[in-house]
Amino acid sequence: MAKVIRTIIDEDANISTDFSGFVGDECQVEEERLRQALASLGLVLHVSDKKRKAVESENSATVNQIIRQ
């Protein structure tokens, strides 16, 4: 399965990110790398909710974040 990161920004500037195809703690590592990359551009995100998907879903996670500038 391909590794895919889907990000949606709603009308209130809340960000939902879905990590698919990552195994084990890979999605947490990639989520942190994404947050660090955005922070280097001046966009600081704080996690408000994190849900780990079932093993059948490749241990992927959905992360809801709030923008803080």
Image (cartoon, rainbow, N blue to C red):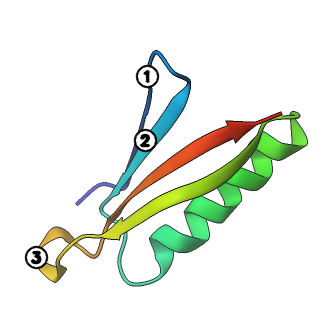
Can you say which quadrant of the picture contains the N terminus?
bottom left
**Which numbered mark, 3 or 1, is in the foreground of this view?**
1
What crowding class fits label 1: few (fewer than 14 Cα within 10 Å), some (14-19), or many (20 or more)?
few
Q: CA distance from mark 3 to mark 1?
A: 28 Å
Which residue: 83% across, 45% down?
Answer: 39
* Residue type of the residue flagged with mark 3: Glu
Measured as percent of width and height from the top left, residue 48 is found at: 53, 56
**In the rendered structure, which amino acid carries the disc numbered 1?**
Asp
Residue at point 77%, 47% (across, down)? 37
Q: Which mark is residue 56?
A: 3
Mark 3: few/some/many CA within 10 Å (<14, 14-19, 20+) = few
Which amino acid type corresponds to the residue marked 2 in the rendered image?
A: Ser
Query: Residue 23: x and y, percent?
Result: 35, 78
- Say which residue label 1 marks: 10
Mark 2 closeness class: few <14, some 14–19, many ≥20 residues within 10 Å: some
Q: Note whether 66 is above or below 1 in the view shown.
A: above
Is 45 on the left-hand or right-hand side of 26? right
Q: Residue furthest top?
A: 11
Residue linked to disc 2: 16
Q: Which residue is depicted at the point 30% across and 54% down? A: 2
Instruction: Estimate the spatial distance between the alpha carbons at disc 2 and disc 1, rounded to whole Å.
Output: 8 Å
- Is 32 positioned to the left or the right of 6 in the image? right
SS at mark 2 in the image: strand
**Mark 3 or mark 2, earlier in chain:** 2
Q: Secondary structure at mark 3?
A: helix
- Indicate left or right for 44 with 30 as reference: right
Could you tell me which secondary element the residue under label 1 belongs to? loop
- Along the line of sight, which residue is nearer the eye, 69 or 28? 69
The quadrant where residue 31 appears:
bottom right
Dot placed on the residue nearer the N-terminal end, 3 or 1: 1
